[in-house]
Image (tube, rainbow, N blue to C red):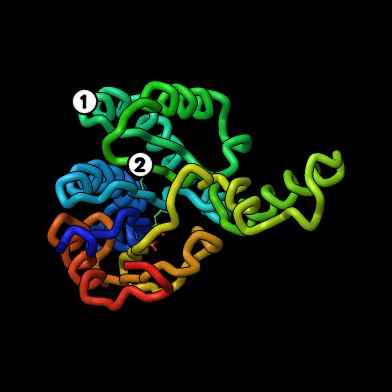
């Protein structure tokens, strides 16, 4: 019975890397490096706790306006992650997808993403999604553009644009909506993350910075989720 209270899909806004680093007298990039390590650990913890889908917000469309050396450090980290995680994903049966507008990323990162997605596409364990150059408004805009193109080409009538059609044009079309959204480090905003998909999602906030997030914290979020009444026709 308790299984039905475990969220199938958990999404995370990993906030506080910079503040964590500052508290330790380290450069912001050191916070991101530690944050990357926590991502890897949480992926294993998610599996142990029975979570089927895990989605993390790694780089937003707004993050380009950060100082160039920080953007560079984040891209380096993501590039390395794409290249080095294939082995671990295969070992742990993890399927990795990337959402967001990847066309704006460096060519070698796009290739590394494609390679990782392709290598892991048959894996049936945790379905891991990384949002890179992702913004929900941008995602919806791209979906509308694609649908408008289909309507203009008379492949679809305007009256046939249902919620399902919109859903099928989002980056997340292969994923169920998140049941639980976690945001770390005290802020309580959604920050342009999965706006369409979070229509019925439960939110959980913690003061812990992302580099300090661990399995016990994840368990706390799951406990809070299990305590809440599930409405809107869901369990
Ligand atoms: C927010 O902290 C965090 C980010 C903008 C980047 C998140 C990236 C990672 C955790 C590492 C890479 C991920 C993977 C998948 C390997 P912040 O810098 O806004 O912190 P602050 O609010 O304290 O300044």
Where residue 68 appears, as percent x and y from the top left, is: 53, 46
Disc on res. 14 = none
Residue 65 appears in the picture as rendered: no
Rendered position, 192 above or below 63: below
Where residue 209 appears, as percent x and y from the top left, is: 27, 63
Q: Which image quarter holds the C terminus?
A: bottom left
- What is the number of callouts on the image? 2
Which of the two residues, 124 or 162, is positioned nearer the viewer here?
A: 162
Where residue 105 appears, as percent x and y from the top left, is: 57, 35
- State which quadrant residue 181 falls in: bottom left
Q: Which residue is mark 2?
A: 128
Q: Mark 1 vs mark 2: which is more N-terminal? A: 1
In the figure, is residue 191 to the left or right of 5? right
Cβ(mark 1) to ligand 1 < 8 Å? Answer: no
x 53%, y 28%: residue: 110
C-alpha span from label 1 to label 2: 14 Å
In the figure, is residue 231 to the left or right of 71? left
Residue 95 appears in the picture as rendered: yes
Q: Residues within 10 Å of mark 1 (few under 14, many from 20)?
A: few
In the figure, is residue 144 to the left or right of 15? right
Where residue 90 appears, as percent x and y from the top left, is: 27, 25
Disc 1 element? helix
x 21%, y 31%: residue: 92
Q: Which residue is mark 1?
A: 91
Which of the two residues, 148 or 111, is positioned nearer the viewer here?
A: 148
Which of the two residues, 132 or 50, is positioned nearer the viewer here?
A: 50
Disc 2 element? strand
Q: Residues within 10 Å of mark 2 (few under 14, many from 20)?
A: many
x 43%, y 37%: residue: 97
């Amino acid at each position: 019975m308790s299984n039905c209270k475990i969220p199938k899909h958990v999404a995370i806004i990993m906030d506080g890397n910079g503040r964590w680093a500052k508290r330790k007298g380290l450069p912001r990039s050191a916070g991101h490096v530690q944050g990357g390590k926590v991502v890897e650990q949480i992926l294993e913890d998610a599996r142990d706790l029975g979570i089927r889908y895990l989605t993390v917000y790694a780089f937003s469309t707004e993050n380009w306006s950060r100082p160039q050396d920080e953007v560079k450090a984040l891209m380096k980290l993501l590039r390395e992650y794409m290249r080095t995680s294939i082995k671990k994903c295969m070992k742990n049966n993890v399927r990795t997808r990337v959402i967001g507008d990847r066309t704006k990323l460096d060519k070698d990162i796009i290739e590394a993403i494609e390679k990782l997605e392709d290598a892991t596409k048959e894996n049936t364990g945790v379905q891991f999604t990384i949002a890179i150059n992702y913004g929900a408004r941008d995602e919806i805009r791209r979906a509308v553009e694609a649908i408008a193109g289909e309507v203009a080409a008379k492949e679809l009538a305007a009256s046939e644009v249902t919620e399902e059609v919109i859903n099928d044009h989002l980056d997340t079309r292969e994923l169920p909506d998140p049941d639980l959204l976690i945001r770390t480090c005290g802020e309580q905003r959604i920050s342009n993350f999965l706006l369409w998909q979070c229509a019925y999602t439960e939110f959980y906030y913690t003061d812990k910075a992302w580099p300090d997030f661990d399995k016990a914290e994840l368990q706390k979020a799951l406990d809070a989720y299990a305590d809440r009444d599930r409405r809107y026709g869901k369990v």
